[in-house]
Image (cartoon, grey):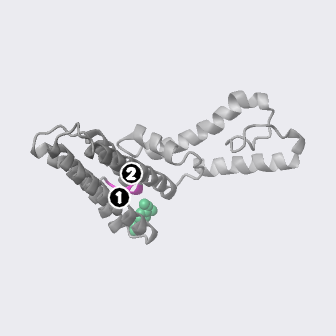
């Protein structure tokens, strides 16, 4: 039995018994992933809570282990979709894409701030404006990748995602050509790794030729 199926069964079983035995209702914070468990709250502090959260954790790991940037994959999903309980390629890819979207918007805001900071030279600020453009191109391509996923067009999906990696890289090219230190280097690298993770998830089970 697949772990996802097992978890669903466990969930249904727990839900059914808690409906049948309202007196066994326990008080845990609303929205807590363990709120459906018909066990005494004392037990929740130990094994029950651990195994349910551990189960979700294990499911998440089973996806992220297909990526090159495992920790980034885990943290992206936790941050972008903390309530995610349905684990499949589509939902994991959607969560990772949501995370890239948020991060790229933050990066644009960061670059805009620096581009207006007189502490930087005119040349660096000019290059930062270029980065804002190329990061924005990446965001457009992310939208197109989302459209392609909805249209079940895997080829377009993968070329849009690959284009994003180039878009982010183009930001750094200008700095490298002029041997200037790029204030966005870390952002670019993280964003590229995040997109690489999306590609790895949507192509998992296939040879690494995307
Ligand atoms: C397209 O990608 C999805 C998941 O990312 C996969 O399940 C499906 O088999 C792929 N379709 C084709 C035709 O390769």
Whether residue 193 appears in this view of the structure is: no
**On the rendered image, what quadrant is the C terminus found in?**
bottom left
Q: Residue at x 50, y 47 (%)?
A: 80
Residue at left 58%, top 42%?
56
Residue 208 in view (yes/no): yes
Which of the four quarters of the rendered structure image does ligand 1 lie in? Answer: bottom left
- Discs 2, 1 touching: Cβ within 8 Å: yes
10 to the left or right of 96: right
Confirm whether the magenta stretch covers residue 203. yes
Residue at mark 1: 139
Q: Which mark is residue 105?
A: 2
Q: Residue at x 80, y 50 (%)?
A: 16
Report which quarter residue 24 is drawn in. Answer: top right
Residue 190 sits in quarter: top left
Residue 134 coordinates in the image, percent (x, y): 26, 56
Q: Residue at x 68, y 34 (%)?
A: 49
Location of residue 153 with respect to 31 vertically, above or below: below
Q: Main secondary structure of the magenta part?
A: loop
Q: Is mark 2 within 8 Å of ligand 1?
A: no
Q: CA distance from mark 2 to mark 1?
A: 8 Å
Closest to the observer: 27 or 11?
Answer: 27
Crowd band around label 2 with a 10 angstrom C-alpha radius: few (<14), some (14–19), many (20+): some
The residue range painted magenta reads: 202-207
From the image, state whether disc 2 or disc 1 is nearer to you: 2
Q: Residues within 10 Å of mark 1 (few under 14, many from 20)?
A: many
């Amino acid at each position: 039995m697949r772990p996802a199926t097992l978890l669903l069964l466990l969930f249904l079983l727990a839900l059914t018994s808690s409906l049948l035995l309202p007196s066994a209702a326990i008080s845990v914070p609303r929205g807590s992933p363990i709120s459906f468990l018909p066990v005494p709250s004392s037990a929740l502090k130990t094994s029950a809570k651990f195994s349910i959260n551990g189960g979700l954790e294990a499911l998440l790991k089973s996806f992220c282990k297909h990526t090159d940037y495992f920790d980034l994959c885990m943290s992206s999903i936790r941050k972008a979709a903390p309530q995610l309980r349905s684990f499949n390629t589509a939902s994991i890819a959607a969560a990772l894409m949501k995370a890239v979207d948020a991060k790229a918007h933050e990066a644009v805001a960061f670059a805009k701030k620096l581009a207006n900071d007189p502490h930087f030279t005119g040349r660096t600020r000019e290059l930062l404006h270029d980065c804002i453009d190329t990061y924005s191109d990446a965001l457009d391509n992310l939208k197109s990748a989302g459209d392609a996923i909805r249209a079940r067009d895997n080829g377009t999906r993968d070329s849009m995602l690959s284009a994003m990696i180039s878009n982010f890289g183009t930001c750094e090219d200008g700095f490298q050509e002029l041997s200037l230190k790029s204030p966005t280097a870390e952002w670019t690298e993280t964003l590229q790794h995040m997109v690489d993770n999306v590609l790895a998830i949507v192509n998992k089970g296939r040879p690494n030729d995307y």
